[in-house]
Image (cartoon, helix red, strand yellow):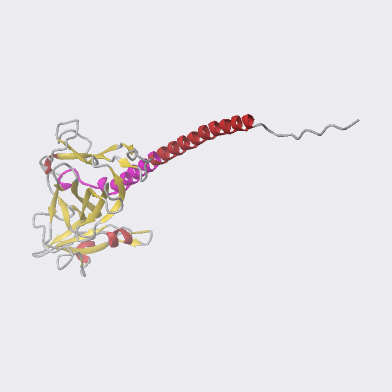
């Protein structure tokens, strides 16, 4: 009996076409899922990055603004609140003696790096009303800078005409006796004073992220540095004034400024195609004195 030929296994054309269509549908669905997950990751990473920009800049600002005094602490501000210049103390002391040409002061110990990094812009002494009188030298980085004073007994001695103020040494950091010009003729012996630097903070076009804003820090007599970016153009400073609970963008009389709102609207460094960068809105406030009016 003749043997029948064995049928060869395989797929029909219809089966192949159906398989291709099914694989295509699965592939399209999987691709969409991957793209959605990628967009979600980019958006979430962008939000995290924007929050980090806002928080880091807040920490940097606070280190200076928390030192600002309650009267005259801001001596310059731009319309719209994109720029402020603050007077920041970096070393404290007491008046020892007033001469015809200089104020002699005993300064408390401070970390040497704090003094080295600071850009001296003048000093201020506390007057009888409890506020500080600002003394601005004509050349703070030149002849009017802080000078060592050789006759330290004028501060430390207890004799006639001597202040009787002891200098301190803490953890290897020693106080010092200095000569400051111009003279604060109305200051009294043992009056508190501080050395200060002037620091300008500005929200301006970023050099690191074109088309976005950056936060710049510029000490008087020093170089400008973009310390954080990117920000939205709405980032700015707003001002609290005497007797008001809400801040304002319009710059008031500088003497009336009691604190600032810092609007830190950070942006993500990257964005999904066709979408704007993720923005995280953050606002923090610094009050130079915890009272509505004084």
**Dividing the image into 4 quarters, which one contains the C terminus?**
top left
Q: Is residue 60 magenta?
A: yes
Q: Residue at x 20, y 46 (%)?
A: 69
The span shown in magenta is 47-74
State the predominant SS element of the stretch in magenta.
Answer: helix
**Dividing the image into 4 quarters, which one contains the N terminus?**
top right
Q: Is residue 62 magenta?
A: yes
Q: Residue at x 14, y 31 (%)?
A: 243
Quarter of image, res 20: top right
Q: Does residue 223 sit above or below 203 in this rendering?
A: below
For residue 14, side relative to residue 74 (left or right) = right
Q: Residue at x 54, y 34 (%)?
A: 24
Residue 50 x, y percent position in the rendering: 35, 42
Query: 234 or 67, which is in the foreground?
Result: 234
Residue 232 x, y percent position in the rendering: 27, 42
Q: Does residue 14 sit above or below 140 in this rendering?
A: above
Residue found farthest to the right? 1
Q: Does residue 260 sit above or below 153 in this rendering?
A: above
Query: 37 or 259, which is in the foreground?
Result: 37
Residue found farthest to the front? 2
Query: 286 or 218, which is in the foreground?
Result: 218
């Amino acid at each position: 009996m003749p043997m029948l030929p064995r049928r060869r296994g395989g797929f029909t054309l219809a089966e192949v076409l159906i398989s291709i269509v099914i694989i295509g549908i699965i592939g399209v669905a999987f691709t969409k899922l991957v793209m959605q997950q990628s967009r979600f990751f980019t958006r979430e990473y962008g939000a995290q990055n924007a929050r980090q920009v806002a928080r880091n800049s807040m920490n940097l600002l606070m280190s200076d603004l928390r030192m600002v005094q309650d009267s005259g602490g801001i001596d310059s501000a731009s319309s719209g609140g994109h720029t402020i210049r603050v007077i920041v103390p970096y070393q404290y002391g007491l008046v020892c003696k007033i001469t015809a040409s200089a104020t002699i002061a005993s300064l408390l110990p401070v970390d040497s790096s704090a003094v080295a990094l600071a850009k001296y812009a003048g000093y201020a002494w506390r007057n009888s009303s409890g506020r500080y009188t600002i003394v601005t030298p004509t050349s703070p980085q030149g002849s009017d800078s802080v000078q060592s004073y050789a006759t330290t007994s004028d501060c430390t001695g207890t004799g006639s005409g001597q202040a009787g103020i002891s200098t301190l040494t803490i953890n290897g950091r020693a106080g010092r006796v200095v000569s400051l010009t111009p003279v604060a003729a109305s200051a009294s012996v043992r009056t508190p004073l501080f050395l200060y630097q002037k620091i300008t903070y500005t929200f301006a076009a970023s050099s690191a992220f074109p088309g976005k804003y950056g936060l710049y820090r510029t000490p008087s007599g020093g170089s400008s540095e973009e310390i954080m970016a990117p920000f939205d153009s709405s980032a700015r400073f707003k001002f609290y004034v005497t007797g008001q609970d809400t801040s304002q963008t319009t710059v008031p009389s500088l003497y009336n400024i009691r604190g600032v709102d810092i609007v830190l609207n950070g942006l993500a460094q990257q964005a999904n195609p066709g979408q704007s960068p993720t923005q995280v809105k953050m606002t923090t406030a610094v009050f130079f004195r915890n009272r509505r009016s004084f």
